[in-house]
Image (spheres, helix red, strand yellow):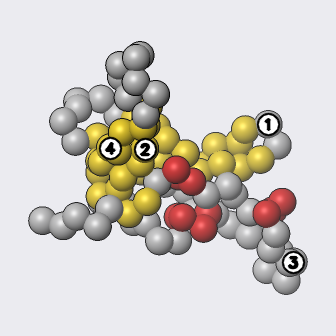
């Protein structure tokens, strides 16, 4: 299940210091969206990125050091294993049914 980001003090000025990393992307994404991201190619002799796509299953809130980071749980197309990718690295795919 995804967690909602709760702001403790609504009057307090929102800054990067008190909001989760990736929260700007979370506002534009929904569970079930097709998303894309870039990843290193599998071949070691290539130094290029390849574009990947998958289905957004869950948005997870993690605390890393002292910061809150949003992580996406994704089922990549053509794979049978989940991937966990920082939400900041994702973009909504323009492809549709």
Disc 3/disc 4 C-alpha distance (Å):
38 Å
Whether tag 2 and tag 1 are in contact, CB under 8 A, the answer is no
What number is the disc on residue 65?
1
- N-terminal of the pair, mark 2 or mark 1, is 2
Disc 2/disc 1 C-alpha distance (Å):
25 Å
Instruction: State the SS at label 4.
Output: strand
> Residue farthest to the right?
12
Residue for point 83% across, 60% down: 17
Q: Circle 3 sits on which residue?
A: 12
Instruction: State the SS at label 3.
Output: loop
Q: Pointer 1: residues within 10 angstroms few (<14), some, or many (20+)?
A: few
Instruction: State the SS at label 2.
Output: strand
Q: Circle 4 sits on which residue?
A: 52
Whether tag 4 and tag 2 are in contact, CB under 8 A, the answer is yes
- N-terminal of the pair, mark 1 or mark 4, is 4
Whether tag 3 and tag 4 are in contact, CB under 8 A, the answer is no
Whether tag 2 and tag 3 are in contact, CB under 8 A, the answer is no
Q: Pointer 4: residues within 10 angstroms few (<14), some, or many (20+)?
A: few
Q: Position of residue 20 (x, y in %)?
A: 69, 58
Q: Nearer the viewer, residue 50 or 96?
A: 50
- N-terminal of the pair, mark 3 or mark 4, is 3
Residue 55 can be seen in this image: yes
Disc 3/disc 1 C-alpha distance (Å):
23 Å
Q: Pointer 3: residues within 10 angstroms few (<14), some, or many (20+)?
A: few
* 46 in relation to 62, above or below: above
Q: Nearer the viewer, residue 71 or 96?
A: 96
Q: Position of residue 43 (x, y in %)?
A: 35, 19
- N-terminal of the pair, mark 4 or mark 2, is 2
Q: Circle 2 sits on which residue?
A: 38
Question: Residue 24 vs residue 1: left or right?
Answer: right
Quadrant of the rendered image containing residue 19 = bottom right
């Amino acid at each position: 299940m995804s967690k909602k980001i709760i702001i403790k003090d609504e009057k307090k000025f929102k800054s990067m210091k008190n909001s989760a990393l990736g929260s700007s992307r979370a506002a534009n994404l929904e569970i079930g969206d097709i998303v894309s991201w870039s990843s290193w190619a599998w071949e070691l002799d290539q130094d290029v990125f390849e574009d990947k796509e998958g289905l957004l299953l869950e948005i997870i809130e993690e605390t890393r050091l002292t910061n809150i980071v949003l992580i996406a749980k994704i089922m990549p197309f053509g794979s049978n294993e989940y991937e966990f990718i920082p939400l900041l690295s994702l973009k909504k795919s323009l492809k549709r049914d």
